[in-house]
Image (cartoon, grey):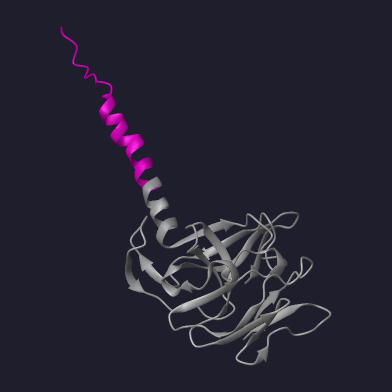
Amino acid sequence: MTSNEITTAAPSLSRRIAGEVLPMIVVAIVTMAARSSLADHYIIPSGSMEHTLAIGDHVFVDKIAYGVRVPFTNIELAPGVVPQRGEVIIFDSPEDGKRLIKRVVATGGDHVSMTQGELQINGHRMRETSDAPTENYDGRVATLNLNYGGGPDIAPSIVPNGMLLVVGDARGNSRDGRFFGLVPEEYAYGKAISVIYRKDEGFVWKDL
Protein backbone atom coordinates (compact mmCIF):
# COMPACT_ATOMS: atom_id res chain seq x y z
CA MET A 1 0.00 0.00 0.00
CA THR A 2 1.14 3.51 -0.70
CA SER A 3 1.45 6.01 2.11
CA ASN A 4 -1.32 8.54 2.53
CA GLU A 5 0.92 10.96 4.48
CA ILE A 6 0.91 14.51 3.21
CA THR A 7 4.22 16.35 3.22
CA THR A 8 4.47 20.13 3.29
CA ALA A 9 7.20 21.78 1.29
CA ALA A 10 9.43 24.24 3.14
CA PRO A 11 8.47 27.87 2.55
CA SER A 12 10.35 29.46 -0.29
CA LEU A 13 12.90 32.18 0.41
CA SER A 14 10.64 34.83 -1.09
CA ARG A 15 7.77 33.80 1.19
CA ARG A 16 10.02 33.92 4.21
CA ILE A 17 11.12 37.43 3.29
CA ALA A 18 7.52 38.50 2.78
CA GLY A 19 6.43 36.91 6.05
CA GLU A 20 9.31 37.94 8.30
CA VAL A 21 11.47 40.70 6.87
CA LEU A 22 8.85 42.80 5.07
CA PRO A 23 6.78 43.55 8.22
CA MET A 24 9.96 44.71 9.97
CA ILE A 25 10.73 47.04 7.07
CA VAL A 26 7.20 48.45 7.16
CA VAL A 27 7.43 49.07 10.91
CA ALA A 28 10.80 50.79 10.47
CA ILE A 29 9.45 53.06 7.72
CA VAL A 30 6.35 53.95 9.73
CA THR A 31 8.51 54.70 12.78
CA MET A 32 10.86 56.93 10.81
CA ALA A 33 7.92 58.71 9.19
CA ALA A 34 6.38 59.36 12.61
CA ARG A 35 9.68 60.71 13.92
CA SER A 36 10.00 62.91 10.84
CA SER A 37 6.50 64.40 11.01
CA LEU A 38 4.95 63.87 14.46
CA ALA A 39 7.38 63.68 17.37
CA ASP A 40 11.01 62.94 18.03
CA HIS A 41 13.75 63.57 20.55
CA TYR A 42 16.76 65.84 20.19
CA ILE A 43 20.10 65.46 21.98
CA ILE A 44 21.67 68.74 23.08
CA PRO A 45 25.12 68.97 21.44
CA SER A 46 26.50 72.15 23.06
CA GLY A 47 26.25 74.47 26.04
CA SER A 48 24.55 77.33 24.19
CA MET A 49 21.26 76.80 26.08
CA GLU A 50 22.71 76.50 29.61
CA HIS A 51 21.46 76.55 32.26
CA THR A 52 18.06 75.58 30.90
CA LEU A 53 19.51 72.72 28.85
CA ALA A 54 22.75 70.85 29.48
CA ILE A 55 25.01 69.05 27.04
CA GLY A 56 23.67 65.54 26.48
CA ASP A 57 20.09 66.30 27.55
CA HIS A 58 17.44 64.40 25.60
CA VAL A 59 14.57 66.71 24.69
CA PHE A 60 11.10 65.65 23.55
CA VAL A 61 10.10 67.57 20.41
CA ASP A 62 6.54 68.13 19.12
CA LYS A 63 6.83 68.30 15.33
CA ILE A 64 3.20 69.18 14.61
CA ALA A 65 2.99 72.23 16.87
CA TYR A 66 3.93 74.56 14.04
CA GLY A 67 2.35 72.61 11.18
CA VAL A 68 1.96 69.10 9.77
CA ARG A 69 4.51 68.22 7.09
CA VAL A 70 4.96 65.45 4.55
CA PRO A 71 7.35 62.90 6.10
CA PHE A 72 11.03 63.49 5.27
CA THR A 73 10.26 66.89 3.66
CA ASN A 74 9.45 70.47 4.64
CA ILE A 75 6.24 70.46 2.59
CA GLU A 76 3.45 71.67 4.86
CA LEU A 77 0.13 69.83 4.79
CA ALA A 78 -1.65 71.84 7.47
CA PRO A 79 -0.62 74.99 9.33
CA GLY A 80 0.02 75.04 13.05
CA VAL A 81 0.33 77.82 15.57
CA VAL A 82 2.91 80.60 15.35
CA PRO A 83 5.93 80.25 17.68
CA GLN A 84 5.54 82.37 20.79
CA ARG A 85 7.98 84.32 22.94
CA GLY A 86 9.80 82.06 25.38
CA GLU A 87 9.31 78.82 23.44
CA VAL A 88 12.35 76.67 22.71
CA ILE A 89 12.32 75.65 19.05
CA ILE A 90 14.17 73.37 16.66
CA PHE A 91 14.95 75.01 13.33
CA ASP A 92 17.38 75.05 10.43
CA SER A 93 19.92 77.86 10.61
CA PRO A 94 19.47 80.43 7.83
CA GLU A 95 23.26 80.67 7.84
CA ASP A 96 24.24 77.12 6.89
CA GLY A 97 21.14 74.92 7.27
CA LYS A 98 22.52 73.32 10.44
CA ARG A 99 19.82 72.11 12.84
CA LEU A 100 19.76 74.23 15.99
CA ILE A 101 17.82 74.61 19.22
CA LYS A 102 17.33 78.11 20.66
CA ARG A 103 14.78 80.21 22.51
CA VAL A 104 12.40 82.57 20.74
CA VAL A 105 12.85 85.87 22.58
CA ALA A 106 10.96 88.17 20.20
CA THR A 107 8.33 87.80 17.47
CA GLY A 108 6.87 90.00 14.76
CA GLY A 109 6.16 93.56 15.93
CA ASP A 110 8.27 93.35 19.11
CA HIS A 111 10.61 96.22 20.01
CA VAL A 112 13.81 94.54 21.18
CA SER A 113 17.24 95.46 22.52
CA MET A 114 20.02 93.69 24.44
CA THR A 115 22.92 95.10 26.43
CA GLN A 116 25.49 92.81 28.08
CA GLY A 117 23.05 89.93 27.85
CA GLU A 118 20.20 91.95 29.40
CA LEU A 119 17.15 91.64 27.15
CA GLN A 120 14.40 94.23 26.85
CA ILE A 121 11.16 93.55 24.99
CA ASN A 122 8.72 96.38 24.32
CA GLY A 123 10.44 98.48 26.98
CA HIS A 124 10.19 95.73 29.61
CA ARG A 125 13.34 94.32 31.27
CA MET A 126 13.04 90.55 30.99
CA ARG A 127 15.54 89.57 33.71
CA GLU A 128 13.76 88.93 37.00
CA THR A 129 16.54 89.24 39.60
CA SER A 130 20.24 89.98 39.74
CA ASP A 131 21.06 87.06 42.06
CA ALA A 132 19.55 84.30 39.91
CA PRO A 133 19.68 85.37 36.26
CA THR A 134 16.34 84.21 34.92
CA GLU A 135 13.85 85.59 32.43
CA ASN A 136 10.11 85.03 32.53
CA TYR A 137 8.11 84.83 29.31
CA ASP A 138 4.51 84.62 30.51
CA GLY A 139 5.32 81.66 32.75
CA ARG A 140 8.11 80.14 30.67
CA VAL A 141 11.29 80.61 32.68
CA ALA A 142 14.70 80.84 31.02
CA THR A 143 17.60 80.06 33.37
CA LEU A 144 20.51 82.02 31.94
CA ASN A 145 24.23 81.29 32.02
CA LEU A 146 26.15 84.58 31.98
CA ASN A 147 29.49 83.09 33.02
CA TYR A 148 30.74 83.70 29.47
CA GLY A 149 29.50 87.29 29.44
CA GLY A 150 26.54 88.65 27.55
CA GLY A 151 27.74 88.19 23.99
CA PRO A 152 26.94 90.69 21.23
CA ASP A 153 24.51 93.48 22.03
CA ILE A 154 21.35 94.11 20.01
CA ALA A 155 20.65 97.71 19.04
CA PRO A 156 17.04 98.85 19.56
CA SER A 157 15.03 97.49 16.65
CA ILE A 158 11.64 96.11 15.63
CA VAL A 159 11.19 92.49 14.54
CA PRO A 160 9.32 92.39 11.20
CA ASN A 161 6.10 90.39 10.96
CA GLY A 162 6.68 86.74 10.12
CA MET A 163 10.16 86.72 11.65
CA LEU A 164 11.62 85.40 14.93
CA LEU A 165 14.59 86.46 17.02
CA VAL A 166 16.20 83.37 18.56
CA VAL A 167 18.90 83.56 21.23
CA GLY A 168 20.66 81.01 23.43
CA ASP A 169 20.26 81.11 27.20
CA ALA A 170 24.07 81.05 27.55
CA ARG A 171 24.27 84.55 26.11
CA GLY A 172 28.05 84.68 25.73
CA ASN A 173 28.37 81.12 24.40
CA SER A 174 25.75 80.97 21.68
CA ARG A 175 25.86 81.52 17.93
CA ASP A 176 22.31 82.68 17.37
CA GLY A 177 20.19 85.39 15.80
CA ARG A 178 22.71 88.03 16.81
CA PHE A 179 25.08 86.43 14.28
CA PHE A 180 22.90 84.97 11.51
CA GLY A 181 19.92 87.29 11.76
CA LEU A 182 16.21 86.74 12.13
CA VAL A 183 14.57 83.39 11.38
CA PRO A 184 11.39 83.11 9.27
CA GLU A 185 8.50 81.57 11.21
CA GLU A 186 8.21 78.72 8.70
CA TYR A 187 11.75 77.59 9.57
CA ALA A 188 10.49 76.45 12.98
CA TYR A 189 9.55 72.79 12.51
CA GLY A 190 9.59 71.54 16.09
CA LYS A 191 8.70 72.77 19.58
CA ALA A 192 10.85 71.49 22.45
CA ILE A 193 8.40 70.35 25.14
CA SER A 194 10.47 68.80 27.91
CA VAL A 195 13.78 67.34 28.98
CA ILE A 196 13.16 63.60 29.16
CA TYR A 197 16.64 62.34 30.08
CA ARG A 198 19.51 64.05 31.86
CA LYS A 199 22.91 62.67 32.76
CA ASP A 200 23.22 61.76 36.45
CA GLU A 201 19.43 62.10 36.87
CA GLY A 202 18.18 59.49 34.42
CA PHE A 203 14.69 59.71 32.98
CA VAL A 204 12.94 62.92 33.99
CA TRP A 205 10.22 65.25 32.78
CA LYS A 206 11.28 68.90 32.98
CA ASP A 207 8.92 71.20 31.13
CA LEU A 208 10.46 73.87 28.93
In the rendered structure, the answer to whether residue 152 lies left or right of residue 26 reads right
- Residue 22 position by quadrant: top left
Compared to residue 56, the image places residue 9 above or below, namely: above
Residue visible at 33% across and 72% down? 78
Q: Where is residue 13 in the image (x, y as percent from the top left)?
A: 28, 25
Viewer-proximal residue among 198 and 150: 150
- The reply to whether residue 82 is visible in this rendering is no
Q: Which residue lies furthest to the bottom in this view?
A: 123
In the picture, residue 101 is in which quadrant? bottom right
Picture quadrant where residue 175 is located: bottom right
Q: x, y percentage for residue 171?
A: 69, 70
Residue 54 in sight in this render: yes
| Residue at the extreme top | 1
Extreme-left residue of the structure: 1
Q: Looking at the image, which residue sits at the far right? A: 131
State the extent of the magenta-drawn residues as a range. 1-27
Instruction: Give yes or no for residue 81 being in the magenta stretch.
Output: no
Report the side of 48 relative to 71 (left or right).
right
Residue 194, image x and y in percent? 60, 67
Residue 160 coordinates in the image, percent (x, y):
46, 83
In which quadrant will I find the C terminus? bottom right
